[in-house]
Image (cartoon, rainbow, N blue to C red):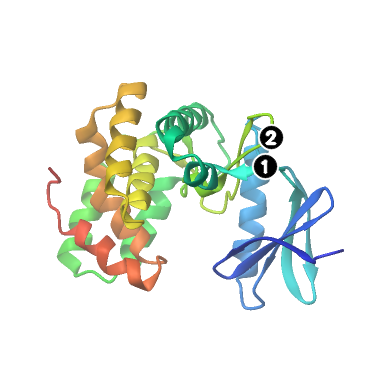
Amino acid sequence: MNLEKVIAVRTNKCVYRDGEYAVKVFDSDYSKADVLNEALNQARVEETGLDIPKIKEVTTVDGKWAIVSDYIPGKTLDRLIKENPEKKDEYLEMFVDLQIKMHSMKCPLLNKLKDKMNRKISEAKLDATTRYDLHTRLESMPKHTKLCHGDFCPSNIIITPDGKPFIIDWSHATQGNASADVARTYLLFWLEGDKDTANKYMELFCKKSDTAKQYIQKWLPIVAASQSVKGKPEEREQLLSWVDVVDYE
């Protein structure tokens, strides 16, 4: 295995290109269960027919766990937006269309989004009253079984040279309510300091999917609390500020 060309460096992992394969190598202390779960998620999502890199094998490299999948040539949507700012609105349309297409898929063997969020809320550094309120809100939300990415952002979309989009990084994939997935994407833009794009994105998604904005906004405190558990330390305080918004306006 030739791991000389680095494609991407992420927290706790590094992605290399080895010919026609991408090799994601995890840090030595990374949870084996999390690596295997990510590979299983990706294998299950493959069965939907969505354009995603196909898993080739799960192995170890110098004692570290690694996932080998197809290498997808191209640029991330994030990079394309930065290189072509005049096309940002066009790229945002593509981004939202792709997310809506993904939400139309079913993947019945994935973990349930509600179960994951209930577990995360229980782990969040919040007082008992706030946790109770969030658990109650979550239980009152409609139960859906749509394919949710959990980290749907422009850096997780690769556009091939012929313009075909591929969705990568399925470690957080679940089945559940699409509006929770949208709330997560909105918060990702917001955490990047790009509130203008966050708002444009939400408006566009609501228009294209005929979803009430208020419905997605009801998810924001729940999703923020859930994300605060494993979020970056510098983001945790910002995320927890969303939890305090009793009824987001």
Q: Is residue 223 left or right of residue 71?
A: left
Q: Mark 2 points at which residue?
A: 161
Q: Is residue 8 above or below residue 144?
A: below
Front one among 106 and 68: 68
The amino acid on which the numbered mark 2 sits, given as a three-letter code, is Pro
Q: In this view, does 25 lie above or below 160?
A: below
Residue 48 spot, x, y in % from top left: 63, 31
Instruction: Residue 209: name its quadrant.
Output: top left
Instruction: Residue 171: name its quadrant.
Output: bottom right
Q: Mark 1 points at which residue?
A: 74
Q: Is residue 80 left or right of residue 118?
A: right
Front one among 8 and 81: 81
Q: Which residue lies at the image location 31% right of the left edge and 43% below the top edge?
A: 198
Among numbered discs 1 and 2, the one appearing first in the sequence: 1
Disc 2 element: loop
Residue 145 spot, x, y in % from top left: 45, 34
Question: Do residues under tags 1 and 2 come within 8 Å of each other at their CB atoms?
Answer: yes
